[in-house]
Amino acid sequence: METCTHSREHDARAITRSHPDGSWTDDHLHRFIIRGQRYGEAREGALQFSTAATALTLSAFALREHEAFFYVYDFNAWWRHDIRVERRVLRDLRFYKAEKGTRYKHIDSLFSDVIDWKLIRNHWKDLMQVAISIQTGRVMLSPMLLRKLSHGGRHNRLFAAARELGRVLRTVYLLRWISQKDMRQEVTATTNKIESYHAFTKWLNFGGDVITENDPNEQQKRVRYIDLVASAVILQNTVDMIRIMQEIHAAGEPVSAADAAFMSPYGTTGVKRFGNYHLDLKRPPEPWLKESLFRHAVKRARADAGKGLRSENKPGVSI
């Protein structure tokens, strides 16, 4: 699928929508939406695209595992397909053996090279010094330091040692991923939550998701502002869901924790993005603000925020 152009993917999806009598004729507009950009085939008198779908393959985007994009067909019926990269083929990933000559039953073909343990041992103290300095706040993780650690020059042995250690950790992680079903399920569930939140904030940020400011402070404020709006909507959605569950329980209907686990606070159907906003400062607080559950949650959030602020204010040396 990665070598397939968007146009050919459109043809492949059309097969699944064809009528039994073969009457489907592909006479509707369609487009792909990937990372906020639109791609499709231009039609005279209709939509125009800066990049044609016939000129791009999915591999050109280097989509991450669990990353999603959208395909829309027939702009009147608006048939939208949410497409997600579930996993990359294992043969595209590199595994490294611990020792040369070692063979592994069933999975030996996955391994392509051997770890250079001598390189890691020779630079182990340097790696630990950098890691401990960053963790204790003695050295700030600045862009310059990242450039030094990521520069793959011939004389940068620290980079080579860090890369070799990364190969060890990556191979161990991939082997765990293959062998542990519970781990795959947990990672997938957590990733889905994160991607759902990103899609939720992008929906709220209807003014455009590209930060044009070059000032880091302005960029940080932009991110904090959208997180603040998202948190407010999430809070209201959670309160609304709790009220509904309380009403259902009061009516004698059972409400199980297993059913509640499938609920999400990222709902958008009840949010009016483009409506009139009125701030009434004289409006009394809602009753649920005084409930013990909410008060305890606020105390925990403030305590966690205080810990984070104290850690940020630790003295450090910028490199």
Image (cartoon, rainbow, N blue to C red):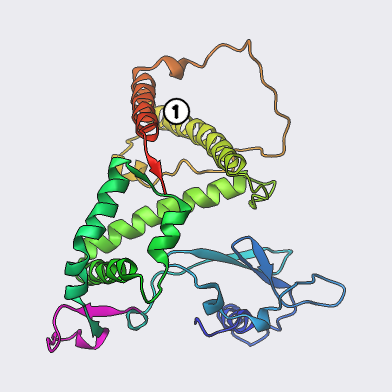
Task: Looking at the picture, tell me which residue is in the foreground, 268 or 104.
Answer: 104
Relative height, residue 285 to residue 6 (above, below): above
* Residue 310 located left or right of residue 30: left
Q: Position of residue 79 (x, y in %)?
A: 63, 65
Question: Which residue occupies 30% across, 39% down?
Answer: 256
Q: Position of residue 202 (x, y in %)?
A: 59, 49
* Residue 170 located left or right of residue 248: left
Q: Circle 1 sits in a helix, a strand or a loop, which is it? A: helix
* Residue 137 located left or right of residue 58: left
Q: Residue furthest right?
A: 45
Task: Looking at the picture, tell me which residue is in the foreground, 47 or 89.
Answer: 89
Q: Position of residue 271 (x, y in %)?
A: 61, 38
Q: Main secondary structure of the magenta part?
A: loop
Crowd class of label 1 (few under 14; some 14 to 19; many from 20; radius 10 Å): few
Provide the residue span drawn in magenta: 93-111
Q: Is residue 242 visible to the viewer in this orientation of the structure?
A: yes
Q: Position of residue 315 (x, y in %)?
A: 36, 34
Question: Which residue occupies 68% across, 50% down?
Answer: 212
Relative height, residue 251 to residue 200 (above, below): above
Asked if the stretch drawn in magenta spans residue 195, the answer is no
Question: Which residue occupies 47% across, 54% down?
Answer: 143
Question: Which residue occupies 55% across, 84% down?
Answer: 4
Q: Is residue 252 visible to the viewer in this orientation of the structure?
A: no
Asked if the stretch drawn in magenta spans residue 105, the answer is yes
Q: Quadrant of residue 310?
A: top left
Circle 1 is placed at which residue position? 243
Relative height, residue 178 to residue 298 (above, below): below
Q: Tag 1: residue type?
A: Arg
Relative height, residue 223 to residue 101 (above, below): above
Q: Quadrant of residue 162?
A: bottom left
Label count reads: 1
Task: Looking at the picture, tell me which residue is in the foreground, 164 or 237.
Answer: 164
